[in-house]
């Protein structure tokens, strides 16, 4: 079995042990940032593909209801936003976790969250393929993905900061997520993304 596929299976089977294995790689900072930008680009490509490949213009009413569509039509801007948010999230989780008594290194935190993003990309590809066959099954798979992703995230976050409880990791996640959402809303407003989509300036 391919080493990456085996690692993905191990992550689902025993996330705590797999997290220890990944942290043991001791990857240098430049390698981590290259991997971060790579997984961000792949996730953006998979998220944007259905909108970019769709024939015809996006319905204005749908665009108004889902402002994210305006962003998906501009992959470069979307990539900068995704990569930037990922970098900020890693930093925020690490330093906030340290303030809560966590240990570990920033490099370990980066390695674990980058691997989770890589797994997310694999899952997105499968969901995209399912959507071409049966949209209902694709939506169910997406729902399961969100639940599994949260479970894995908490285990990896706990491992990175040496927390003794998933509840501490969950509390940290809620606090940091709230701050990031507020910050993201501010950034989007400054970029000109309003309720009507991405404005043209």
Image: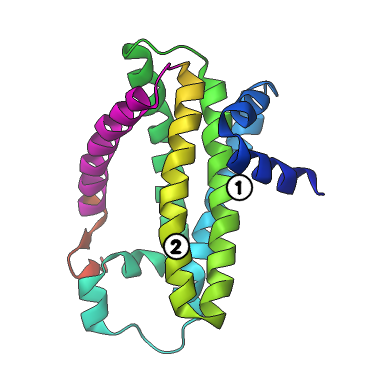
Q: Is residue 54 visible?
A: yes
Q: Position of residue 134 (x, y in %)?
A: 51, 81
Quarter where residue 84 is shown: top left
Report the span colored magenta: 163-189
Residue placed under numbered mark 1 in the picture: 38
Residue placed under numbered mark 2 in the picture: 142
Q: Quadrant of the C terminus?
A: bottom left
Q: Is 7 situated above or below 91?
A: below
Q: Residues within 10 Å of mark 1 (few under 14, many from 20)?
A: some
Q: Main secondary structure of the magenta part?
A: helix
Which residue ends up furthest to the bottom in the rendered image? 56
Q: Is 174 situated above or below 47?
A: above
Quarter where residue 172 is shown: top left
Whether the magenta-drawn stretch holds residue 58 is answered as no
Q: Are marks 1 and 2 in contact (CB under 8 Å)?
A: no
Q: Residue at x 36, y 86 (%)?
A: 57
Whether the magenta-drawn stretch holds residue 184 is answered as yes
Q: Residue at x 33, y 20 (%)?
A: 96
Q: Residue at x 58, y 30 (%)?
A: 111
Q: Is 120 situated above or below 15?
A: below
Q: Position of residue 56 (x, y in %)?
A: 41, 89
Q: Earlier in the sequence, mark 1 or mark 2?
A: 1
Q: Position of residue 38 (x, y in %)?
A: 61, 47
Q: Residue at x 53, y 49 (%)?
A: 40
- In the rendering, which numbered label is found on residue 93? none
- 7 sits to left or right of 135: right
């Amino acid at each position: 079995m391919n080493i990456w596929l085996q690692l993905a299976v191990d992550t689902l089977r025993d996330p705590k042990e797999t997290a220890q294995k990944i942290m043991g790689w001791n990857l240098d900072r430049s390698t981590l940032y290259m991997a971060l930008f790579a997984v961000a680009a792949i996730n953006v490509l998979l998220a944007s593909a259905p909108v970019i490949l769709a024939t015809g213009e996006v319905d204005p009413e749908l665009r108004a209801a889902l402002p994210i569509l305006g962003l998906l039509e501009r992959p470069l801007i979307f990539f900068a936003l995704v990569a930037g948010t990922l970098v900020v999230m890693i930093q925020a989780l690490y330093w906030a976790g340290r303030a809560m008594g966590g240990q570990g290194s920033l490099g370990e935190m980066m390695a674990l969250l980058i691997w989770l993003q890589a797994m997310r990309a694999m899952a997105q590809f499968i969901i995209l393929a399912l959507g071409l066959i049966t949209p209902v099954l694709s939506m169910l798979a997406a729902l399961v993905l969100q639940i599994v992703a949260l479970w894995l995230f908490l285990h990896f976050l706990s491992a990175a900061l040496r927390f003794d409880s998933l509840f501490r990791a969950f509390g940290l996640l809620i606090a940091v997520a709230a701050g990031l959402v507020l910050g993201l809303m501010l950034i989007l407003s400054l970029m000109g993304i309003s309720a009507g989509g991405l404005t043209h300036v």
